[in-house]
Image (cartoon, rainbow, N blue to C red):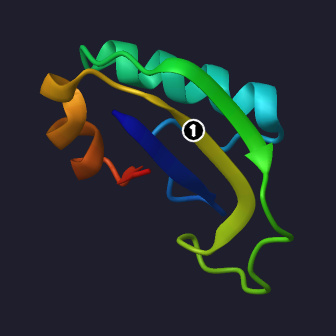
Amino acid sequence: MGVRYAQTQCADRWGQASGTQQLAAAAQAYLAQQGLTLHQPQASVKNAGAVCSACNCPTGLVLEGTVQPADLSAVLALGFTRQ
């Protein structure tokens, strides 16, 4: 199942990532600690992000990948959305 996560300014459970590779690695490591696997993780810049400084404002980086159907509800609870 395809999932997507829009990185925030500072509300991500795995901490702040400064680029696409760091975002994919940090999120994948965090999910692994939770017993979840994000297959084929790819992060990319989708837009310029929001012009605000609240922790939950998006940065413009988006992480996409796939998860097993059994893991879908768990990653959705972590803020991912279905693609």
Q: Secondary structure at mark 1?
A: strand
Quadrant in the picture for residue 66: top left
Q: Position of residue 22 (x, y in %)?
A: 74, 27
Closer to the camera, 34 or 53?
A: 34
Q: Position of residue 70 (x, y in %)?
A: 13, 24
Quadrant in the picture for residue 67: top left
* Left or right of 10 on screen, residue 72: left
Quadrant in the picture for residue 59: bottom right
Closer to the camera, 15 or 79?
A: 79
Q: Residue at x 65, y 69 (%)?
A: 58
- Residue furthest bottom in the image: 52
Residue 19, placed above or below residue 4: above
* Left or right of 3 on screen, residue 23: right
The residue under label 1 is 64
* Left or right of 33 on screen, residue 63: right
Number of marks in the rendered image: 1
Q: Residue at x 50, y 36 (%)?
A: 14
Q: Residue at x 66, y 63 (%)?
A: 9
Amino acid on which disc 1 is placed? Glu
Q: Position of residue 16 (x, y in %)?
A: 66, 44
Task: Assess disc 1: are there few (<14), some (14-19) or many (≥20) residues with their C-alpha within 10 Å of its C-alpha.
Answer: many
Tell me the quarter of the image containing the N terminus: top left
* Left or right of 24 on screen, residue 59: right
